[in-house]
Amino acid sequence: MLGTNCVVHPGVKIGEGAAAGSMSLITKDVDPWWIYIGMPAKKLKKREKGKIVELEKQLKMDVI
């Protein structure tokens, strides 16, 4: 997930479940399941995959 006005340089790989805050500048590959912020973007904290997957399932049930 990329926040508003993020810039991602060409060839940069975004790992599964990674997130970047608004106006972040992504210059290097982003590790899976981490939150990045800043210019240039740096790791902020690890995301919990289980919680994200559970929230996604709950959202899908609410929409249906």
Image (cartoon, rainbow, N blue to C red):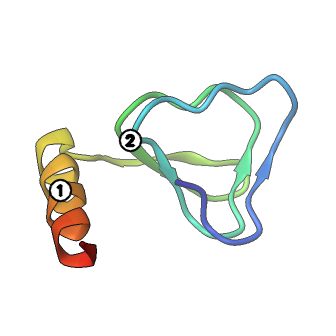
Q: Is residue 34 left or right of residue 49?
A: right
Q: Residue at x 59, y 32 (%)?
A: 14
Q: Which residue is identified by label 1?
A: 57
Furthest residue in direction bottom, as rendered: 62
Question: Residue 22: x, y in percent?
Answer: 63, 70
Q: Residue at x 12, y 53 (%)?
A: 54
The number of numbered badges drawn on the structure is 2
- Disc sitting over residue 34 in the figure: 2
Q: Residues within 10 Å of mark 2 (few under 14, many from 20)?
A: many
Question: Residue 31: x, y in percent?
Answer: 47, 28
Furthest residue in direction right, as rendered: 10
Q: Secondary structure at mark 2?
A: strand
Q: Nearer the viewer, residue 59 or 53?
A: 59
Question: Residue 26 lies in what quarter of the image?
Answer: top right
Q: Residue at x 60, y 57 (%)?
A: 2
Q: Secondary structure at mark 1?
A: helix
Q: Quadrant of the C terminus?
A: bottom left
Question: Residue 33 lies in what quarter of the image?
Answer: top left
Residue 53's place in the image compared with 23, above or below, is above
Q: Nearer the viewer, residue 42 or 23?
A: 23
Q: Nearer the viewer, residue 63 or 37?
A: 63
Q: Residue at x 63, y 26 (%)?
A: 29
Question: Residue 46: x, y in percent?
Answer: 28, 43
Question: Residue 13 lies in what quarter of the image?
Answer: top right
Could you tell me how far apart the alpha carbons at marks 1 and 2 are, in whole angstroms?
Answer: 20 Å
